[in-house]
Amino acid sequence: MSDHNNNNHTPPPQHPGGGGGGATMAFIVGGLVVAVGVIAWVMFGDSGGGGDDLIGGSEPSDVNVSVETSDDAADDVADAAEDTADAVEGAADDVEGAAQDVEDAADNVEGETQQ
């Protein structure tokens, strides 16, 4: 009888470098997916700071501001304005007096040169 034992299977081809390239690529792609997910969570996620309230999650509240003045404060401002006006008038008088002194000195110099 004949032997019908057909064991002539060829083994799969061996790649130099030991293979594993697919596992490395999957690890890199997985790391990138996780990194993008973390960045998206940080940028768009609610970090507990109540960001939804700023966008429109709650109604705005009313703010009332009142400023109270007194007659004493108004009188103080009026007195300061009057003092400032007096100081400006005094400075103008001083400038006018200095201008007169310069004019008198010029007249004296002119009179001496004519003699």
Image (cartoon, grey):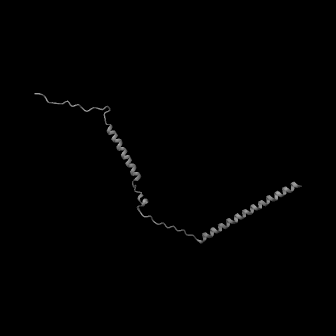
Q: Residue placed farthest to the top in the image? A: 1
Return the x and y of residue 6 as percentages of the image width and height: 17, 30
| Above or below, 62 relative to 29 | below
Q: Which residue occupies 65% across, 66% down?
A: 81
Q: Which residue occupies 38% across, 49% down?
A: 38
Return the x and y of residue 56 as percentages of the image width and height: 42, 61
Q: Quadrant of residue 82?
A: bottom right
Judge by depth and name the residue closer to the eye, 78 or 42: 42
| Above or below, 72 relative to 104 | below
Q: Quadrant of residue 70?
A: bottom right
Image side of residue 33 versus residue 7, left or right:
right
- Number of marks present in the image shown: 0
Q: Quadrant of residue 92?
A: bottom right
Q: Which residue occupies 83% across, 58% down?
A: 107
Judge by depth and name the residue closer to the eye, 70 or 42: 42
Q: Quadrant of the N terminus?
A: top left
Judge by depth and name the residue closer to the eye, 10 or 99: 10
Q: Residue placed farthest to the bottom in the image? A: 71
Q: Quadrant of the C terminus?
A: bottom right
Image side of residue 59 versus residue 20, left or right:
right
Q: Which residue occupies 32% across, 39% down?
A: 23
Return the x and y of residue 47 as percentages of the image width and height: 40, 55
Q: Residue placed farthest to the right in the image? A: 115
Return the x and y of residue 71 as percentages of the image width and height: 60, 72
